[in-house]
Image (cartoon, helix red, strand yellow):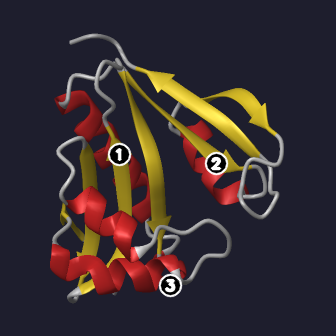
């Protein structure tokens, strides 16, 4: 039976788990310094999915002052936890965080070669806005996606 994942606001004690999760992915990664900054940033929503005391996923939503849009800065699911709907839950939670903050939609960038993430976002109603050639540090290209929701 798969573990039950609980979503909650990240804490400083989650830092080792967040860094271990980031280390599982190639390319651009958030550093300890960046995570610590976002943990204390009132314009950031850093949330984790935890099971058995282990961080299995997270998302980071940024709320820029003066912007009607939120930005999904990062989202990650431990490869061992994939295929259980955790990515969908994290994305839905990111959307909730943006809505509660009064934002009209969510924007983000994703690697073009990340087929699983692209499929998740498109299934959730996100639409491709632009191609981003050589966008990532390693030269990988990206897509910009966005989704607006109806005003309450």
Q: For mark 2, what is the residue?
A: 110
Label 3 and label 1: CA atoms lie apart by: 23 Å
Q: Nearer the viewer, residue 54 or 23?
A: 23
Q: Which mark sits nearer the N-terminus, 1 or 2?
A: 1
Q: How many C-alpha atoms fall within 10 Å of the one at disc 1: few (<14), some, or many (≥20)? A: many
**Residue at image location 35% in from the left, 41% down from the top:** 62
Tag 3 and tag 2, C-beta contact below 8 Å: no
Which secondary structure, mark 1?
A: strand
**Residue at image location 25% in from the left, 82% down from the top:** 51
In this rendering, position of residue 25 left or right of residue 63: right
- Which quadrant would residue 64 be assigned to in this image? top left
Q: Nearer the viewer, residue 9 or 132?
A: 132
Work out whether 96 lies above or below 120: above
Q: For mark 3, what is the residue?
A: 80
Tag 1 and tag 2, C-beta contact below 8 Å: no
Which secondary structure, mark 3?
A: helix
On the rendered image, what quadrant is the N terminus found in?
A: bottom left
Q: Position of residue 61 (x, y in %)?
A: 35, 45
Q: Position of residue 124 (x, y in %)?
A: 50, 37
Q: Is residue 3 visible?
A: no
The nearer-to-camera label among 3 and 2 is 2
Which mark is on residue 61? Answer: 1
Work out whether 28 lies above or below 147: below
Label 1 and label 2: CA atoms lie apart by: 14 Å
In this rendering, position of residue 22 left or right of residue 6: right
Q: Which mark sits nearer the N-terminus, 3 or 1?
A: 1
Q: Nearer the viewer, residue 93 or 20?
A: 20
The nearer-to-camera label among 3 and 1 is 1
- Which quadrant would residue 128 be assigned to in this image? top right
Which secondary structure, mark 2?
A: strand
On the rendered image, what quadrant is the C terminus found in?
A: top left
Q: Which mark sits nearer the N-terminus, 3 or 2?
A: 3
């Amino acid at each position: 039976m798969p573990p039950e994942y609980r979503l909650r606001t990240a804490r400083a004690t989650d830092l080792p788990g967040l860094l271990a999760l980031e280390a599982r992915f190639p390319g651009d990664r958030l550093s300890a310094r960046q995570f610590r900054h976002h943990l204390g940033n009132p314009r950031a929503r850093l949330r984790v999915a935890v099971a058995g005391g282990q961080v299995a996923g997270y998302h980071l939503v940024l709320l820029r002052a003066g912007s009607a849009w939120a930005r999904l800065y990062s989202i990650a699911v431990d490869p061992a936890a994939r295929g259980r709907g955790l990515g969908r839950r994290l994305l839905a939670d990111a959307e909730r965080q943006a809505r509660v903050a009064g934002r009209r939609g969510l924007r983000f960038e994703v690697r073009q070669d990340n087929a699983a993430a692209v499929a998740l976002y498109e299934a959730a109603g996100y639409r491709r806005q632009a191609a981003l050639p050589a966008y990532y540090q390693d030269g990988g290209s990206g897509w910009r996606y966005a989704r607006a929701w109806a005003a309450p």
